[in-house]
Amino acid sequence: MPVGTIQFARRRGKAAAFRNRTMNLPHGLNPDRWRTLLRLAREEDLGPHGDVTTALLPEPLRQAEGRWELRAREAGRFCGRELLAPLSAELAPEVRLEWIAPGDDGRAVQPGETLARLSGRVCQMLAAERVLLNFLQRLSGVATLTARYVERIAGTHAKVYDTRKTLPGWRDLDKYAVRCGGGHNHRRGLYDAVLIKDNHIAGVPTGRLAHTLMDMLTRLAAQGPPPAFVEVECDDLAQVAETFKVVGIDVVLLDNFSPEQVARAAAMRDDLGLRGKVELEASGGITLETITGYARAGADRLSVGALTHSAAAMDLALDAVA
């Protein structure tokens, strides 16, 4: 039997019991989706034959125990402290974890800093190493990029939000990493909030926009549980003015507006006495270079798709130690 099969099947009962004890996931992570993602990650790496390279090692080496240190190779925000235990429990159930670095997920780390030590069966760690790092590097990359955006708007009242631009299966994790970086989560999917986008109301004349939106919101009560919020996307200031006429809208999305246009929309809202009742969200091409201007212009929310669709993985390593 290949070593990959051995490590994930030989002690199935013991490993399952261990996983049940350690399945303590952060808030917002669905356990069923988490298990599915781990299973897919494991299966695509081990395939039908397991770790065929480790299987070539002499039996004493396969059965030996080793030690590894999880280290940061670059500065950033580490994310995965709350997830490494359930990850290792699933992927390498006989490997022990000891945290060295203090603090919670999202803490700043420096190059060369040792974060954790792992010890246990060599064959399990060799098979699990890449999958463990894939998770931790992706999470830490998203948290690091989010923190950079958040730092750019320090001192303003604005907040950084993520979007639905995530990899399939990774949304819960990406949104967790955004929170660890100091950002905020937008809607989780199409099911939990109303966001009326330009494609929903394409062809509606500006003069009919307020009436159309009111008509749509009258049907909201029949949809079941109330949504987390109601948001409407606007392409210009004329649409913004019409949207402000409608009661029941929580957020107005200013799509591809300039900071100057955002400032004018904020002034319109405040003149109508809607400040504190309707938030303004700027979106579309917001970068690290431009986000400060949007925050100072009066946007309450700044949604940035790059947090999850363009974050570079943080450089982490699992180094074997004597």
Image (cartoon, helix red, strand yellow):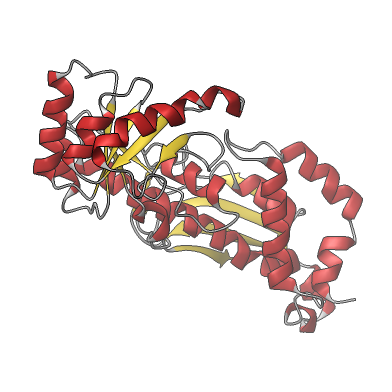
Q: Nearer the viewer, residue 97 or 252?
A: 252
Instruction: Establish if 212 lies above or below 201.
Output: above
Residue 191 point in image, percent of width and height:
56, 38
**Position of residue 26 measured from the top left corner of the image (x, y, whole percent):** 58, 36
Task: Name the quadrant of the C terminus.
Answer: bottom right
* Location of the N terminus (image quadrant): bottom right
Q: Residue at x 77, y 54 (%)?
A: 94
In the rendered view, would you say 264 is above or below 144?
A: above
Please indicate whether residue 270 sits to the left or right of residue 118 in the image. left
Res 99 visible: yes
**Residue at coordinates 34% horizontally, 49% vertically from top-left?**
203
> Who's the residue at 42% across and 44% down the image?
178
The residue nearer to you, when weighing 265 against 10, is 265
Residue 159 visible somewhere in the drawing: no
Residue located 73% across and 53% down the image: 90
Question: Hey, which residue is sitting farthest top in the picture?
Answer: 273
- Residue placed most toward the observer, 223 or 94: 223
Give the image location of residue 293, x and y in percent: 12, 43
Q: Quadrant of residue 236?
A: top left
Q: Is residue 217 left or right of residue 210?
A: right
In the rendered image, which quarter is residue 273 located in?
top left
Q: Is residue 84 above or below residue 25?
A: below
Q: Position of residue 19 (x, y in %)?
A: 77, 44
Using residue 62 as the reference point, say whether residue 299 is left or right of it: left
